[in-house]
Amino acid sequence: MKKLWVRLACVLLMAAVVGCATPDKPSRATLYDFGPGVVQEPALALGPAPGPALSPLVLADIEASAALDGGAVLYRLGYADAHQLRPYAHARWSAPPPQLIRQRLREQLAHDRPVLDLNESSALARSGGAMPRVMRIELEEFSHHFESPSQSAGVLRLRVTLMENTPAGEKLVAQRAVAVRKAASTPDAPGGVRALAAATDAAAEEIRQFLLQAR
């Protein structure tokens, strides 16, 4: 009987050791994007007819540094070390920020005009159409910036360049630096994501107005 109890104690001890040695399953990161955007209501049948669409625009891929072209949701501690970009441990973008920003920008600009990719522009030229203007964008900042542990904002900075296609190549038409800061509702990754999405929408409207002025 004593030997039976000893064996049982050994089995229980081994089970406990194995249980402690088994690593916990890694927690999956939460994926974020900019949400569904604003769905425009259809125009009323008795309302004024929409004006003619503006001339087509080519929207090139947005350029960014390697740090801003990854999937991490980034933040800065302005009150501690504003020069260091830090990734949230369990928060990821569903696509690299340049792609998400370009998609939202294209959706906004398409309300006024056709927005084309570079390959679509080449096809248009081959079919005898005029080469549209090209908009090139550099992403310079896209992070959740903390002024203090409780106060923060989503910060977006872009450099927008509008180019004219000519037989001699691209010619500069206009350039604009766009900087938007939107307060975050909470000092965490979800709050930073919402603030950056709002900053992107505000930047898209500013770029839209820039294009209207550059006609």
Image: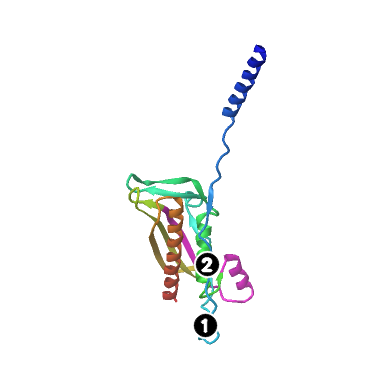
Residue occupied by mark 1: 50
- What is the quadrant of the C terminus in the image? bottom left
For residue 134: magenta?
A: yes
In x, y percent, where is residue 56? 54, 74
In this view, the residue farthest toward the top is 2
Residue occupied by mark 2: 106
Residue 28 shown left or right of residue 67 in the figure: right
Residue 172 shown left or right of residue 123 in the figure: left
Residue pictured at 41% horizontal, 59% vertical: 157
Residue pictured at 32% horizontal, 47% vertical: 79
Q: Against 102, is 90 above or below?
A: above
| Within-10-Å neighbours for mark 2: few <14, some 14–19, many 20+ | many
* Amino acid on which the number 1 mark rests in the picture: Pro
**For numbered disc 2, what is the local secondary structure?**
helix
The magenta stretch spans which residues?
Answer: 116-143
For the residues marked 1 and 2, what is the alpha-carbon distance in whole angstroms? 19 Å
**For numbered disc 1, what is the local secondary structure?**
loop
Residue nearer the viewer, 167 or 18 = 18
Residue nearer the viewer, 24 or 144 = 24
In x, y percent, where is residue 188? 42, 50
In x, y percent, where is residue 172? 44, 68
